[in-house]
Each structure stands twice: as C-alpha cells, then as structure tokens.
Amino acid sequence: MCLAIPGKVLKIDGQAATVDFGGARREVRLDLLRNVREGDYVLVHAGYAIQTLDEKAALETLKAWEEIARGEASA
C-alpha cells in the first residue's frame, strides 16, 4: 500500500522545497511537478511532491489523518 501526505510548501530552492507537515518540516523534491510556489499544498510520496492540492482538499486530508492517528492511539 502506498501513502501520500499533504504538506504546505514553505521555501523553494531549485528543485527542492521545505514542506511543513503539520509542524514537522522535511525537504521534498519537486522534480515531478511544474509551477509549484511557496504557499502551495502538495501531496508527497517517498520524498517527492507528486501533485498539487488546493488548500481545502489538503486540510480535509490532514484532518482525516489526525482522526486516524487518534484512533490508533486509543486502540
């Protein structure tokens, strides 16, 4: 099973970006996308941004991940 996580692009340096995943910041490669800007939300899999998302879709997905995590913690 493959999972992709949305995050917000904070800074771009060439084909690399610093992306915020709800407080955890990681370097992500942008090689697979065009026209990504700081402030955009991207879907990330295996260290690569694979799709841009609008803010609403990204926040809904993050909320779902939070709900899953709470369920795992209480199990």
Image (cartoon, grey):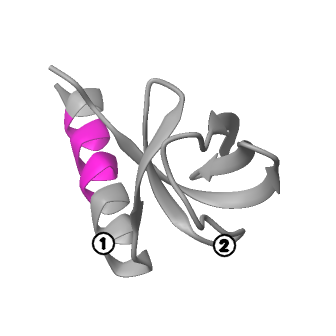
Residue 8 lies, in percent from the top left, at 59, 60
Residue situated furthest right in the rendering: 13
Name the residue: 35% across, 80% down.
Answer: 56
Tell me the element at label 1. Answer: helix
**Relative to the observer, which residue lies in front, 34 or 41?**
34
Name the residue: 39% across, 43% down.
Answer: 5
Query: Which badge, 2 or 1, is on the more N-terminal residue?
Result: 2
> Is residue 55 placed above or below 42 in the rendered structure?
below
The quadrant the C terminus occupies is top left
| Label tally | 2
Q: Which disc number belongs to residue 66?
A: none
> Is residue 7 placed above or below 4 in the rendered structure?
below
* Region in magenta: 64-71
Residue 65 lies, in percent from the top left, at 30, 47
Magenta stretch, overall SS: helix
Quarter location, residue 26: top right
Residue 16 lies, in percent from the top left, at 73, 40
Q: Is residue 66 magenta?
A: yes
Q: Callout 1 environment at 10 Å: few (<14), some (14 to 19), or many (20+)?
A: few
**Relative to the observer, which residue lies in front, 57 or 62?**
57
Query: Circle 2 sits on which residue?
Result: 39
Name the residue: 72% across, 68% down.
Answer: 38
Query: Circle 1 sits on which residue?
Result: 57
In the image, what residue type sits under mark 2? Gly
In the image, what residue type sits under mark 1? Ala
Residue 74 lies, in percent from the top left, at 23, 31
Tell me the element at label 2. Answer: loop
